[in-house]
């Protein structure tokens, strides 16, 4: 976003600079197709089509978030509810004896 710096001559100088957004900036483009302006109903996409195409890439596994895989041999159904979270996992707490 570009901006224009404008000083107001009718105010005494105090060292403050007011930033006025540039009104001629082009509208944001769709994050999927990068060709059409963003529609408010489908933000940040231009249409339902681009929204669903992007979702399909996530579902198919084309898009991934960098990091260690969270899958392991144990499933939620196999886990012992009394055991609590495994050591080192998020949400685990260590109890200290009093």
Image (cartoon, rainbow, N blue to C red):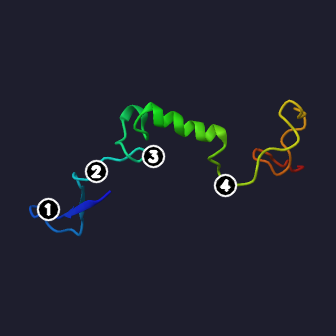
Residue at image position (43%, 39%) is: 45
Q: Residues within 10 Å of mark 1 (few under 14, many from 20)?
A: few
Q: Earlier in the sequence, mark 1 or mark 4?
A: 1
How far apart are labels 4 and 2 at the CA level? 32 Å
Quickly name the residue at label 2.
26
Q: Position of residue 28 (x, y in %)?
A: 35, 47
Q: Earlier in the sequence, mark 2 or mark 1?
A: 1
Discs 2, 1 touching: Cβ within 8 Å: no
Discs 2, 3 touching: Cβ within 8 Å: no
Comparing labels 3 and 4, the label whose residue is closer to the camera: 3
Comparing labels 1 and 4, the label whose residue is closer to the camera: 4
Q: Give the secondary structure at mark 4.
A: loop
Q: Earlier in the sequence, mark 3 or mark 1?
A: 1
Q: Earlier in the sequence, mark 3 or mark 4?
A: 3
Q: Residues within 10 Å of mark 3 (few under 14, many from 20)?
A: some
Quickly name the residue at label 3.
31
Quickly name the residue at label 4.
66
Residue at image position (59%, 41%) is: 57
Q: Earlier in the sequence, mark 2 or mark 3?
A: 2
Residue at image position (65%, 49%) is: 64
Q: Give the secondary structure at mark 3.
A: loop
Q: Position of residue 2 (x, y in %)?
A: 29, 59
Q: Give the secondary structure at mark 2.
A: loop
Comparing labels 2 and 1, the label whose residue is closer to the camera: 2
**Badge number at residue 8:** 1
Q: Position of residue 42 (x, y in %)?
A: 42, 34
Say left or right for 41 vs 16: right
How far apart are labels 3 and 1 at the CA level? 37 Å
How far apart are labels 2 and 3 at the CA level? 15 Å
The correct choice, above or below, for 20 with respect to 38 in the image is below
How far apart are labels 3 and 4 at the CA level? 20 Å
Please state, as top left, top right, bottom left or bottom right, where the N terminus lies in the image: bottom left
């Amino acid at each position: 976003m570009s901006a224009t710096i404008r000083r107001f001559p009718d105010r005494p100088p105090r060292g403050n600079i007011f930033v006025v957004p540039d009104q001629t900036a082009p509208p944001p483009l769709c994050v999927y197709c990068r060709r059409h302006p963003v529609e408010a109903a489908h933000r940040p996409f231009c249409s339902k089509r681009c929204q669903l195409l992007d979702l399909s890439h996530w579902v198919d596994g084309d898009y991934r978030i960098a990091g260690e895989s969270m899958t392991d041999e144990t499933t939620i159904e196999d886990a012992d509810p009394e055991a609590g979270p495994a050591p080192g996992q998020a949400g685990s707490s260590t109890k200290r004896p009093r």
